[in-house]
Image: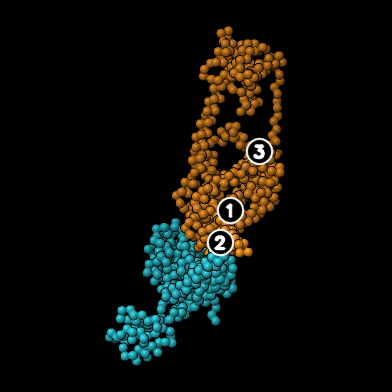
């Protein structure tokens, strides 16, 4: 190993251990548990609300006894063809009696009645809650179906043959949403720790270790080592939660009867998503996604580290956290927009601009099957990491290390100009 | 001529419009102990930092070990900065091994040497203590060990004695001599003359950003005339004694005190013997480094005040 790499690892090791070997890290590691808990409680509450609301709604048909069977058959036939979310609310069929008043039924307590059908099927009276509601239209459609069945007589049953094309090509929409998912995941993981880079050199400046480091090793390796240490923490975090997720999945799989999974529609849906793989294939997509995560982390981390290194006090570092978050969100928005419009000019810009490039390129891996382009992108981003670190180090050397008290470059400039002015005045007077 | 470990030529550094270091050169012979002396704020630390390449000089250059750039020979240098600093959460042994590892020493070897050094310096109690639990002086000794744990060829110590109790100062002097005997070259700065006088083979005095003196301790002391303290026997007439002694002699109680040039010693003794006033007490001593240092710094300061007066006059004239 070259001495440069070795010193990077010495610094990274120190930083990694000093972050991980603290009780606070445990809190950090387990923080997603709180998020999951809160999310689960909120989600359960919300779905319960939705369910109870859905269960409470109904439409009512007041028909003659002879029409009941035909109406029920027509309802189940039509219902089958509609997607789950768009199925009409429960149909309640009642026998029409002279005493039954559709308006009274519509106003009955205990459930929301969206529409009530009464009278003969050929000319039904439909009382609806809202003018022109789909519930009213649905009741009219049912009545028509019943009449049409009756007029046409028994028809031979349709024997459809379904053919699936799911395996032949993934849907573009699914791939785009995978791209967005990758952007979002990388953004979230970067948000976790890259922002912390801004305060990392404050520790060394505070306890004066910076001079030992600066004397002993090139500052570039200090900066890179710190980034690497932080990246190690992030990877530990990801590995921990990936392991938890896989473990949890395995446990869940042993608990649930496979038959039950097949029976539920939800499982069928996620299976469909799995079938439609990203354009580059799952293994490559996950691998390159991780590579882009590392790059995004290093790039943003290098910027934040460099900016933070210029800050003099903890207060200044705290003040910097807002622009930093905005910068991250801006890169996320740009890449998210790019992921929803693959091949557009916006997408190209997002893929070339170095700080959004890892996110946008990860999205591209979902929709574009080209593998070689990613090698180019990773190289391009690596150049920028090196460039940012180089510039940060130059600024740090010129400003913080040399300047003593006046590390702010604009303040130093002012000192120089104020020094220059009196001399100029004197010389102009003496002429 | 002996080989030079440090060759720094014409180092100059501006902080804003203030010239912190002005054309300072340092030539440190290999295997010697070299002191950089100067009052507070004279530019010692900045000179050392430039010598080690931690900051870049605005003019001049620094070459180590025969023409090498300081950045390329980091692993052969040990440096104790003026601003002491260690990671407070680290244990002493780890902190020392960490500093060694930065300079290319193996971690396990660093831990082993840390134990040896700490035991030698009477710090075996705190080997596995965290730095934050230590006293300032202890932490300083840890840092000192950390800066020499990789057995460097050049050891640069910035104000190593400040903050240490006399016992630890003594240990540090021992350590410095031992490192020199091992073959290392030691360059250190201080404003405490006693240490410099005892340790240094050569020294440079920096005052007001410039190097004002370079040479051995004896050469520095030789800049001032020897001081004579003479007590005649009995109670002779002061006027008679004053006439016999060189001009400038002052009575201090029974004794007389006056400076004397090296060549004037024998004639003086002859005169005293011939005068018959007897000798109740006589000492002729070379002033210490302390006096030489104060003398040099005062001269420089006086020059600056004179300059300031001239400046003021010139400004008034404009």
Callout 3 crowding tier (Cα within 10 Å): few <14, some 14–19, many ≥20 = some
Where residue B262 appears, x then y in whole percent? 43, 85
Residue that carries the numbered disc 1 in the rendered image: A302
Q: Secondary structure at mark 3?
A: helix
- The hue of chain A in the figure is orange
Q: Do the numbered discs 2 and 3 sit on residues whose CB atoms are within 8 Å?
A: no
> In front of the other: label 2 or label 1?
2
Q: Quadrant of the C terminus of chain A?
A: bottom right
Q: Chain of mark 1?
A: A
Mark identifier at residue A93: none
Residue A281 at x, y = what percent?
Answer: 66, 45
Q: Is residue B273 above or below residue B312?
A: below
Image label count: 3
Q: Chain of mark 2?
A: B
* In front of the other: A377 or B275: B275
Q: Are marks 2 and 1 in contact (CB under 8 Å)?
A: no
Element under disc 2: loop
The residue where tag 2 is placed is: B16
Quarter of the image where one finds residue A220? bottom right
Q: Earlier in the sequence, mark 3 or mark 1?
A: 3
The foreground one among A186 and B209 is: B209
The residue positioned 55% from the left and 69% from the top of the image is B22
Residue under label 3, please give it: A174
């Amino acid at each position: 190993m070259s001495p440069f790499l070795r010193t990077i690892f010495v610094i990274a090791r120190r930083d990694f251990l000093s972050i991980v070997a603290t009780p606070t890290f445990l809190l950090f590691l387990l923080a997603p548990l709180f998020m999951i808990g809160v999310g689960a409680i909120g989600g359960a509450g919300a779905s319960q609300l939705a369910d109870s609301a859905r269960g409470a709604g109904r439409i009512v048909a007041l028909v003659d006894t002879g029409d009941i069977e035909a109406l029920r058959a027509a309802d189940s036939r039509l219902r089958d063809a509609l997607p789950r979310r768009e199925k009409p609310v429960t149909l309640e069929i009642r026998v029409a009696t002279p005493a039954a008043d559709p308006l009274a039924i519509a106003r009955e307590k205990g459930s929301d009645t969206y529409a009530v059908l009464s009278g003969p099927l050929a000319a039904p009276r439909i009382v609806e809650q809202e003018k022109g509601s789909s519930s009213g239209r649905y009741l009219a459609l049912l009545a028509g179906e019943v009449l049409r069945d009756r007029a046409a007589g028994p028809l031979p049953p349709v024997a459809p043959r379904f053919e699936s094309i799911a395996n032949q090509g993934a849907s573009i929409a699914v791939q785009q949403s995978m791209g967005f998912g990758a952007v979002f995941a990388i953004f979230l993981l970067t948000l976790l720790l890259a922002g912390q880079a801004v305060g990392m050199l404050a520790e060394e400046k505070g306890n004066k270790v910076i001079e030992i480091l600066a004397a002993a090793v090139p500052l570039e390796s200090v900066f890179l080592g710190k980034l690497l240490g932080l990246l190690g923490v992030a990877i530990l975090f990801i590995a921990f939660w990936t392991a938890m997720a896989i473990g949890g999945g395995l446990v869940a799989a042993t608990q649930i009867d496979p038959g039950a999974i097949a029976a539920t529609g939800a499982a069928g849906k996620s299976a469909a998503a799995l079938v439609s793989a990203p354009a580059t294939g799952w293994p490559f997509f996950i691998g390159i996604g991780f590579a882009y995560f590392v790059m995004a982390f290093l790039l943003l981390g290098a910027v934040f580290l460099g900016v933070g290194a210029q800050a003099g006090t903890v207060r200044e570092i705290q003040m910097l956290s807002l622009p930093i978050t905005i910068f991250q969100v801006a890169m996320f928005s740009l890449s998210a927009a790019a992921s929803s419009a693959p091949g557009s000019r916006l997408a190209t810009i997002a893929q070339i601009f170095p700080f959004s490039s890892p996110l946008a390129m990860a999205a591209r891996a979902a929709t574009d099957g080209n593998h070689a382009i990613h090698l180019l992108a990773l190289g391009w981003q690596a150049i920028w990491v090196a460039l940012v670190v180089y510039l940060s180090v130059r600024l740090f050397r010129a400003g913080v290390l040399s300047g003593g008290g006046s590390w702010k470059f604009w303040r130093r400039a002012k000192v120089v100009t104020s020094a220059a002015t009196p001399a100029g005045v004197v010389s102009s007077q003496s002429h | 001529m002996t080989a030079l470990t440090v060759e720094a030529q014409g180092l100059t550094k501006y902080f804003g419009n203030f010239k912190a270091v002005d054309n300072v050169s340092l030539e440190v012979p290999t295997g010697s102990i070299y002191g950089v002396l100067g009052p507070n704020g004279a530019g010692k630390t900045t000179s050392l930092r430039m010598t080690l390449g931690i900051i870049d000089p605005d003019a001049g250059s620094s070459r180590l070990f025969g023409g090498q750039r300081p950045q390329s020979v980091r692993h052969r240098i040990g440096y104790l900065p003026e601003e002491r600093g260690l990671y407070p959460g680290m244990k002493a042994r780890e902190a020392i091994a960490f500093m060694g590892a930065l300079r290319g020493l193996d971690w396990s070897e660093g831990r082993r040497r840390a134990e040896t050094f700490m035991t030698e310096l009477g710090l075996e109690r705190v080997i596995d203590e965290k730095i934050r639990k230590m006293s300032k002086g202890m932490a300083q000794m840890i840092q000192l060990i950390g800066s020499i744990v990789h057995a460097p060829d050049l050891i640069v110590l910035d104000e190593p004695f400040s903050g240490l109790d006399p016992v630890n100062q003594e240990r540090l002097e021992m350590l410095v001599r031992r490192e020199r005997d091992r073959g290392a070259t030691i360059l250190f700065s201080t404003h405490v003359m006693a240490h410099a006088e005892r340790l240094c083979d050569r020294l440079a005095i920096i005052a007001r950003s410039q190097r004002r003196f370079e040479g051995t301790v004896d050469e520095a002391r030789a800049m001032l005339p020897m001081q004579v303290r003479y007590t005649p026997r009995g109670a002779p007439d002061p006027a008679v004694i004053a006439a016999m002694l060189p001009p400038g002699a002052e009575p201090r109680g029974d004794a007389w005190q006056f400076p004397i040039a090296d060549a004037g010693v024998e004639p003086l003794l002859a005169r005293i013997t011939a005068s018959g006033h007897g000798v109740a007490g006589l000492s002729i001593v070379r002033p210490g480094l302390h006096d030489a240092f104060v003398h040099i710094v005062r001269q420089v300061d006086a020059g600056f005040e004179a300059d300031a007066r001239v400046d003021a006059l010139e400004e008034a004239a404009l």
